[in-house]
Image: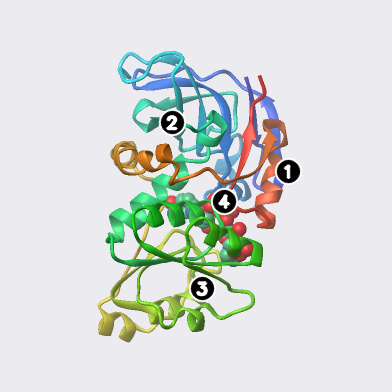
Amino acid sequence: MKAIVITRPGGPEVLQLQERPRPVPAAHEVLIKVKAIGLNRSDLGLREGKYGGALVNGVVPGLEVAGEVVEVGASAPRWGVGDQVCALLTDGAYAEYAAIDARHCLPVPAGWSLEEAASLPETTFTVWSNVFQMAALQPSETVLVHGGSSGIGLTLIQIATALGNKVLATAGTADKCRDCEKFGAARCVNYKEEDFEQAFKEEKINVILDMVGGDYTAKNLRLLAPDGRLQYINAMNGPKVELSLLDIMTKRLRLSGSMLRPRSAEFKAALAAEVEKHVWPLAASGQLKPVIYKTFPLAEAAKAQELMASSEHIGKILLVNEG
Ligand SMILES: NC(=O)c1ccc[n+]([C@@H]2O[C@H](COP(=O)([O-])OP(=O)(O)OC[C@H]3O[C@@H](n4cnc5c(N)ncnc54)[C@H](OP(=O)(O)O)[C@@H]3O)[C@@H](O)[C@H]2O)c1
């Protein structure tokens, strides 16, 4: 089969289309003929060697796919040949076939195409575990998401809006802000033109999902209402921060964060079941819609990653296998 391989840590040019043996599913796995692959920001970090340098040599990247089940392991009874599924992986998605833990696969939601379903696993799993499980967003509460137009941001905006929360967002252009509001945000601030702390200072913000870190941290702490929760999923402006412990003590704030990729197979299986229970009905009812910015053939993975690095996009970028 064809697969995109990281030949060494570096820029997009280190991604090469190569022939690889088709994976053989273990007893607990299914083999999926991959139709589409969702790109994620961490695919860029993996390629650059941020998570382990030379360890990435020869790795097939990619965290999520959608496709058709073509082989079923002996202990994977839920699925049958021909089922259409989307799934979360640790790596190996940028390929024509992938062998995946059967518990990390979910059915393609009603009304979604196979391609669209490839945009679901990483964003829905991350949003559900961070915002609804760890930060325990309650129905009457307000949530602020930075990077509102990212795949993650638009997923949170739609899910939380559907569940009755007020959602606020920040994003870097007027077009991105317009889309955040179109998908449900009560207000999106263009942080390049307005100080988000000033803009939101009258709001009672209970939860903030942050991927920026750096100088956002002190502002986030000042913005949070008493008993607020600040949840980190990245630190794109830097992980070393200065903050006031007084804000935390006086308002009883809680700071936490998580990374999905290194979590155990058991954790991901339990999370998949929760996501299917709570989020899949929203996808089937149209309250959660796919937001696909652009698709590229698998062979053009480097171009797709360049587009993601430019941050021009709104929503998800996909790779697609033809035929
Ligand atoms: N911890 C986890 O388990 C986990 C899982 C999935 C994703 N994530 C993280 O969640 C974030 C969103 O993921 P995604 O794949 O949906 O990303 P994405 O679509 O590439 O969007 C990221 C957006 O963040 C905004 N941004 C704000 N500050 C930035 C900065 N300093 N550098 C670059 N971009 C900046 C950019 O838009 P504007 O600046 O124009 O607004 C950019 O479009 C990423 O940081 C990713 O690593 C974490």
**Nearest the eye: 208 or 157:** 157
Q: Is mark 4 within 8 Å of ligand 1?
A: yes
Q: Position of residue 23 (x, y in %)?
A: 51, 20
Q: Which residue is the site of mark 4?
A: 41
Q: Is residue 228 left or right of residue 168?
A: left
Looking at marks 2 and 4 on the same chain, the residue that comes earlier in the sequence is marked by 4
What amino acid type is highlighted by mark number 1? Lys
Name which of mark 4 and mark 1 comes first in the sequence: 4
**Mark 2 close to ligand 1, CB under 8 Å:** no
Query: Could you say where residue 191 lies in the image, as x and y percent from the top left?
Result: 59, 74
Alpha carbon distance from label 2 to label 4: 27 Å
Query: Which one is in front, 267 or 114?
Result: 114
Q: Is residue 60 visible?
A: no
Tell me the distance, in whole angstroms, between the alpha carbons under discs 1 and 2.
Answer: 31 Å
Q: Earlier in the sequence, mark 1 or mark 2?
A: 2
The structure residue drawn at horizontal position 35% and vertical position 17%, both measured from the top left corner, is: 27
